[in-house]
């Protein structure tokens, strides 16, 4: 393994770890706010700058390290040597060709049609469940609030 390859692997791991920790911090902030909202606390007091800083402070060194490695890689010109080469997989090309031919010359198999119908039915059931659960009114109210307050319509 070359130094460049090791650098790219470490950089990728740092970026993935930073993304995962940011997502976890956002979810933690959301669940804390949802719990406080259930207790009856004012909505705007739940998500303050201080609370966001509190969640992001432990992640900051990792974010800065990831950003530093990315900038360092750009400055030093570290690139994957196979980046510009096309992927060549004969089996994949053969499979893609057969899929294209089947799509042009045949209709979908009965199993595929059954699967498509099941997924479509499940989607319809979940949409109806969301409407009956009150989700439609909630989305409409949030959309109206955004238009009235943020965009300035009305």
Image (cartoon, helix red, strand yellow):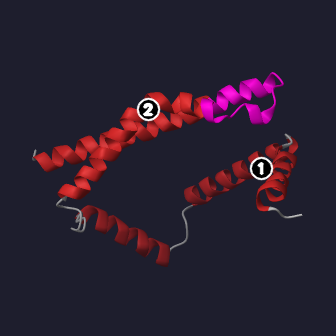
Dot 1: few (<14), some (14–19), or many (≥20) neighbours within 10 Å? Answer: some
| Number of the label disc, if any, that sits on residue 127 | 1
What residue did someone put label 2 on? 59
Q: In the rendered view, does 125 fall on the left or right side of 71? A: right
> Which quarter shows the C terminus?
bottom right
Q: CA distance from mark 2 to mark 1?
A: 37 Å
Residue displayed at 86% across by 49% down: 141
Q: Position of residue 103 (x, y in %)?
A: 48, 73
Q: In the rendered view, does 40 fall on the left or right side of 54? A: right
Residue 127 seen in the figure: yes
What kind of secondary structure does the magenta stretch mostly adopt?
Answer: helix
Residue displayed at 62% across by 57% down: 116
Instruction: Answer whether residue 21 is magenta in the image.
Output: no
Against 26, is 7 above or below? below
The disc, 2 or 1, on the residue closer to the chain's N-terminal end is 2
Describe the element under mark 1 as helix, strand or loop.
Answer: helix
Q: In the rendered view, does 143 fall on the left or right side of 80? A: right
> Which quarter shows the N terminus?
top left
Q: Can you name the residue that lies furthest to the front here?
A: 50
Q: Which residues are magenta?
A: 29-50
Against 10, is 127 above or below? below
Q: Position of residue 59 (x, y in %)?
A: 44, 32
Q: Nearer the viewer, residue 93 or 67?
A: 67
Quadrant for residue 150, please give it. Answer: bottom right
Q: Position of residue 85 (x, y in %)?
A: 21, 68
């Amino acid at each position: 393994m070359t130094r460049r390859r090791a650098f790219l692997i470490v950089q990728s791991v740092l970026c993935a770890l930073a993304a995962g920790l940011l997502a976890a911090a956002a979810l933690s902030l959301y669940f804390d706010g949802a719990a406080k909202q259930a207790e009856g606390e004012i909505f705007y007091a739940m998500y303050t700058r201080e609370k966001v800083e509190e969640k992001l402070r432990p992640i900051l060194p990792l974010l800065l390290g990831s950003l530093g490695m990315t900038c360092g890689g750009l400055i030093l010109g570290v690139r994957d040597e196979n980046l510009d080469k096309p992927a060549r997989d004969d089996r994949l090309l053969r499979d893609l060709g057969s899929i294209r031919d089947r799509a042009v010359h045949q209709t979908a198999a009965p199993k595929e049609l059954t699967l498509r119908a099941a997924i479509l039915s499940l989607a319809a059931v979940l949409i109806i469940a969301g409407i009956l659960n009150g989700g439609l009114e909630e989305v409409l109210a949030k959309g109206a609030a955004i238009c009235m307050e943020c965009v300035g319509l009305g």
